[in-house]
Image (spheres, grey):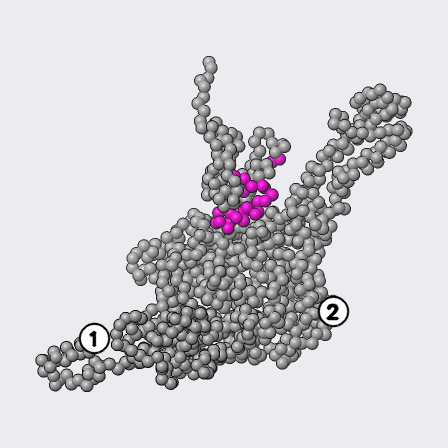
Amino acid sequence: MAKPPRDESPSDKLTPMVRQYNAIKAQYPNYILMFRMGDFFEMFNEDARIASEILGIALTKRPWGDGRDMPLAGVPFHALDAYLAKFIRAGKKVAICDQTEDPKKAKGIVKREVVRIVTPGTILESDILDDKAHNFLASVSVIAARTSLPDKASSPEKAPHQDKAPSLSPAAYSAASTTASPAASTAVAAAEAWGLAVTDLSTGSFEITEFRGPKAASQIFSEMGRLQPAEILLPESLRKREGEWLDPALRPAITWLPNTDFEPSSARRRLLDQFQVQGLEGYGAEGLHSAIGAAGALIQYLRDTQLAALRNINHLNVYNPSNFLVLDFTTQRSLELVQSIHGGGRAGTLLEVLDHTLTAMGGRMLRGWVLQPLKEVAAIRDRLDAVEELYNSPSLRAGLAAHLRKVQDLERIISRIGLGVAGPRDLAALRQSLEQVEPLVRTLTQSGASTDPPANMMGRGPSYELHGASADPPANGPSGAPDVRSSLLRDLRRQLDPHPVLLTLLQRAIADNPPNAVRDSGVIREGYNPELDELRSLATNTSDWMERMRREEIARTGIANLRISFNKVFGYYFEVSKGNLANVPADYIRKQTLVNAERFITPALKEKEEIILNAQEKIAEIEARLFEEIRAEAAAQTRTIQRLADTIARLDCLYGLSAAAIAGKYTRPEVDDGDIIHIRAGRHPVVEALQTDRPFVPNDVLLSNTKDQILLITGPNMAGKSTFIRQVALLALMAQMGGFIPASAGSRIGVVDRIFTRVGAMDYLVRGQSTFLVEMSETANILNNATDRSLVILDEIGRGTSTYDGLSIAWAVVEYLHATEGRRPKTLFATHYHELTDLENELARVRNFNVAVLEQGGEITFLYQIVKGSTDHSYGIYAGKVAGLPKLVLERAKTILHQLEFGHAPAAKGVPGDRKVKLEAPDGMVQLTLFDGLDHPVLETLRALDVNALTPLQALQLLEDLSRKAK
């Protein structure tokens, strides 16, 4: 019985390729799917429309298979990186679907699979990444504090818990988190543990930390500000709370993941599997449940996107931000450490001035040093010793520079190798970098024998005579020659591993200038593989091979006129004349008879023919196989090369700081655990570098917790108050980085634990916060978190509100910083509230300073020098003149000022009235203060009034009279 005709579903009408595409796209609905078809990556439907707009490529169409057309846009496969960069900059995530079998061997449609997912936080392409900045992928988790955490987890020496949270059961946590009670909310905050994991996939770094207590969310906010991650992984449970702790500018970077990805026990198993260990004690991570949850979710995300073994993620570092000088995001932004407020780039930042590094790795590390200066005096002095030795030895600097310049980005190269995406040029760059290691070792070994005289910029001897080290003679290097004096430089020299076995392999195997892709010939060096060499010879010297075989056959057969020829019908063949047919060997196979000759083939000839005809394909196969083998050998050294990269980066940072010191004429500061900051003739490093029209005016500063705790700086606008207070913060930061500072010899920096700033006036419209609210929030942060070891920079507190409100707040802030035990930071406070200068007479540790101004012949000159005492001049109108205000505005402002100074209410211009004023001001006139009283007939009458002597009628008449006078 015949079967009834089957009704075709819509999918039955689609072409096989479209069905394959739809099946893969269904697995990646939230990604741009780049679908490999021959020499192009194609995008279809909505992906094609998006690609056309972002990439600027043509939007076409292709038959769907059911009578409809589907939108189509494509890019050449060899230009993938350039188009990926555009997608990533547009905030898109891309799934790369490649052909996973040879189309020539495919039966039916070619197999295709997604081989990698590219997101903003998982970029590996060097053309997209910034060489001197990390590309961080962060993960955040928050859980209730456990009741049974191991003691070692809460130990401040072993785990980074800033505030130990009270124990709270899950049931209690759940109840507290749903109540509206403020007290309960506080309990929830105190009980929460916030975990942070962060990696740079392109370098293989992987770190975690954890915060507990009511300040945990703000500490996470601060870390996010420092890291500026390209992508942030968050559990769905935080979707309603992101506004509490995340800067709105980072919201586009969020990727939401299921809560189950962050569950600590399963996350822990992922970490154990990733690092192939039995426990996390060796990393100091056991007990950090929230951080482990964040780290496990991050590992899962990388596995899902990279679809490969994460060989470059092979170590876990637990860090504690409080071990470094803490710089919250407000401070980083206000001091313009690594990003300019205007434009967001490096131009005009401290990093731009200090970055004299020669490698990409060193540049990234120096950025980290700027954002995380040290607090431990011994470690700071070790860096200073190394910088000083480099400063004093031109030959040592020159030797290091010559080889550091040739070191490529080892961190990112070995990460690409470990992830299996490195190309031939990556291996060539690895070879070139490893070739510099041994010369670097020799340079550091021989430098001790240098005859370079010390630069002696401090009027003292070489660095090894400082800090009680004069009894230690210079050590000897491995060759017996005098070694570098700095213990840090010696340690770095010992850590420089040249990887001789791997280097030899790369030198033997990889061509001098290999192509960018393995598919292009010329990757493997001649002489490395005999089979490959023979194939290349066959492919390029066919005529030589034919002649060589012809001669061999003549010698074997005795046929003197034997010929080898080729045609498309028979391929290669022997041609024998009629007269020599008797000499044809038995292995010759007749293929064609001609009038005067016959044509033969032999198994050996056909074997050679096949080799020749398939030589290029075979060459490509062998080169690809050899390349994979060599790359695997390099990948096996991932961890040791990562350590080498870290060592070279540290060496480069020290070199860079010495070069910056020479360029800026900096000197070595004395750094100790004392409470004194004494800077002699300090200069603002960035302003000085940018100010080329005149010399920068240096200034001294002395701060201490016992005597000179709060410096109130008054003076005109544009006279240098803000520059001065910022430069003090920058110089303290530079010293704790281990660098020299722009100041005179003998400057002293007592280590500070945090630097706080409240400067500028920027509205956070995205948050719905006004200038004043931001100002007060930042001030509250200072008052709640500063310690006696902190350094606070305040610039014009209170100017975002009414004058009396602002003055009142500023006054109260100074009193609080002066009087609150444990919160008495060294403070520089620039202000226009001249009334605050009275506090010097009231508070023991407040000192008045002002910016000197020279007045001669009606002209005003700012001297940019900070001198003792206060001032009651602001010279605001003069500042307006310097800034370029129109002359009419300046003249009108002078008129209004004179009216106010004489006690008259200013009249609106053009309004009739008899409120005339003289424009001449009396000599010695000073600026009005908020507490100046204005004489008025009403006030005079009230002062002389005896209320008890008035009758009711007199009181009414007096009231009428006062009303008239007031009007």
Q: Nearer the viewer, residue 810 or 442?
A: 810
Q: Is residue 32 visible?
A: no
Q: Position of residue 61 (x, y in %)?
A: 50, 34
SS at mark 1? Answer: loop
Q: Is residue 875 magenta?
A: no
The quadrant in which the C terminus is found is: bottom left
Q: Position of residue 402 (x, y in %)?
A: 69, 63
Q: Position of residue 685 (x, y in %)?
A: 54, 71
Q: Is residue 84 magenta?
A: yes
Q: Is residue 935 visible?
A: yes
Q: Residue at x 62, y 56 (%)?
A: 409
Would residue 717 appear left or right of 115 to someone viewing this image? left
Question: What span is in magenta?
Answer: 73-102
Vertical placement of 206 versus 109: above or below?
below
Residue on which the image places disc 2: 480
Q: In the rendered structure, which amino acid carries the disc numbered 2?
A: Gly
Would residue 215 appear left or right of 932 to someone viewing this image? right
Would residue 6 appear left or right of 382 to someone viewing this image? left
